Image (cartoon, rainbow, N blue to C red):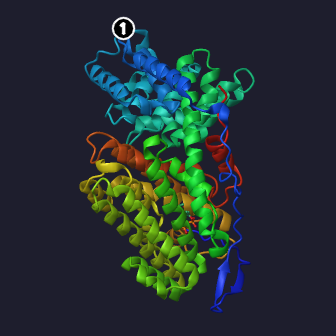
Amino acid sequence: MSSHFPASIMKTNDIYDTKRSLANFHPTIWKEHFLSFTFDDALKVDGGMKERIEKLKEEIRMMVIASVQNPLVKLNLVDSIQRLGVSYHFEDEIDQFLEHMYVSYNNSLLFSSNDSQDDDLHISALLFRLLRQHGYRISCDIFLKFMDNNGKFKESLVEDERGILSLYEASHMRGHGEALLEEALEFTTTHLKAYIHLYSNINPNFASEVSNALKLPIRKCVPRVKAREYFEIYQQQPSHNETLLTFSKLDFNILQKLHQKEIAEICRWWKDLNVSTNFPFARDRIVECYFWILSIYFEPYFKFGRKILTKVIAMTSIMDDIYDAYGTFEELQLFTLAIKRWDMSMVNLLPQYMKVHYTTLLDLFEEMDKGIVNDGISYRSCFGKEAMKRQAESYFKEAEWLNKNYKPKYGEYMEVALASSGYELLSTISFVCMGDIATKEVFEWLFDCPQILKASTTISRLMDDVVSYKFEKEREHIVSAVECYMSNHGRSEDETCAELLKQVEDAWKTINECCLHPMNVPMPFLICLLNLTRVMALLYSHEDGYTNSKGRTKLLIQSLLIDPLHL
Ligand SMILES: CC(C)=CCC/C(C)=C/CC/C(C)=C/COP(=O)(O)OP(=O)(O)O
């Protein structure tokens, strides 16, 4: 848990003559960029363009459903479709194909002993990864044929660079206790690092593919970001499919325009909120918030969800800055009470800056209710509000600790810090906006804190605390997982960070296991939780890329929301 306030925090007197902390967060880097976005007419989707896209799409669909003598060859096509970010157009076709592959594999119909593909590490690893990604419980014993009698991968595999890379990606699908996949991860990581040096001159395209994979494997990376990265790689591959490449580029650019329009609308709302005047102490990060939410769902049909969720995360970000530093303890008591009551008349109890926040928050939930009311389902809205109340309560608990100068034990800290991570709230609101597949049972399941949610919140909290601690240990800040763990277990900072990051790795295994059949809720909800986790892995791997968004985060945003792909 971090407040990003330096030791030299400025103390200021406001109208209540109260000492408050003001942060030195950098201002927004986007200013009015998205407000004044001019849409490039050259990218306009006219009737002719629509027809062309439909034709390309149909061609790809036919490729996916065409019967071929050896279905294993189709795996590469399906993988590319997914990695280029267009699989949402062919979901049924891909599902059917993979189900067929799973049944055939289990009936030993895919690999025969005299078939050269039996020894093809790339094909085996790809089959394994694609099936697990779709929830099939394919055993990791598929890789036994590539191991020697000592349980090690055969050294001769090192010559098969593509196979090694595929095995590396497959190993990230591992669950608890899958020693073979742990071994695969170690073996492939070592060799991939060596390939980067080996190939940087003779095959720079492959070297950069490897380097991207080592930074973030497919399983842990936000699909949209991976897609943007993969375009560069895929188009350089001599074997690439031109129809698929063109279709995917057009689709990317069309979605980018849609996203630009959405963000322009959200930025107008943010501008009206007048953050720099009403909340000068808070992070001004609306574009980063949209990027966060775009990573959860990017498809056109989640437009409403993106709008609401972006506003929710932005309001929560201001709330975090109020609870972490700016609000006095007495104000926080009132604010928490007001949120728990959820009643506009409570606004009179609050100081001016909280009044603005509170009314905007209640208005926002009304906007959400209006958007879902057509579905005639009110329970979703109740779960949404309940999640926001819990968020405020957990923030308040932390403020209480700070107020009493109380240092919780690691377990006690984590119980509250998992809730304050905001991921229970974000997952609830994202489900609220997913339409009527979000039944009451789905929310009951979510509110029962299922394993996958616990794993996702653990990853968020620990990644946040580990990176924030490294950068802020010299500064005044409230208690964090790192401090609690160090003092409870008598460990050094390095040992603690290593232990906490091991807990992060274990949580990923839990997520992988929870995404296998039989599932407690339909796959789209699990994907949503998976994507929420992926944003953390992306933004918080080396620093807090949300708060300090001038570096890599800016480039990521630019690549998804500003630069179109060249056709
Ligand atoms: C990183 C995280 C837990 C995100 C959850 C999603 C969420 C609600 C994001 C809004 C912005 C926010 C509070 C970021 C964390 O800041 P911080 O590092 O100051 O949060 P803290 O005070 O809870 O540690």
* For residue 256, above or below residue 268: above
- Foreground: 438 or 375? 375
Q: Is residue 473 visible?
A: no
Residue at image x 43%, y 13%? 117
Q: Quadrant of residue 68?
A: top left
Quadrant for ligand 1? Answer: bottom right
Residue at image x 65%, y 76%? 476
* For residue 484, above or below residue 231: below
Residue at image x 51%, y 37%? 218
Q: Give the SS element for disc 1.
A: loop
Residue at image x 54%, y 38%? 255
State the image coordinates of residue 362 (x, y, percent, origin top left): 44, 71
In which quadrant will I find the C terminus? Answer: top right
State the image coordinates of residue 534 (x, y, percent, origin top left): 50, 47
Q: Quadrant of residue 424?
A: bottom left
Q: Quadrant of residue 254?
A: top right
State the image coordinates of residue 516 (x, y, percent, origin top left): 32, 40
415 vs 261, left or right, is: left
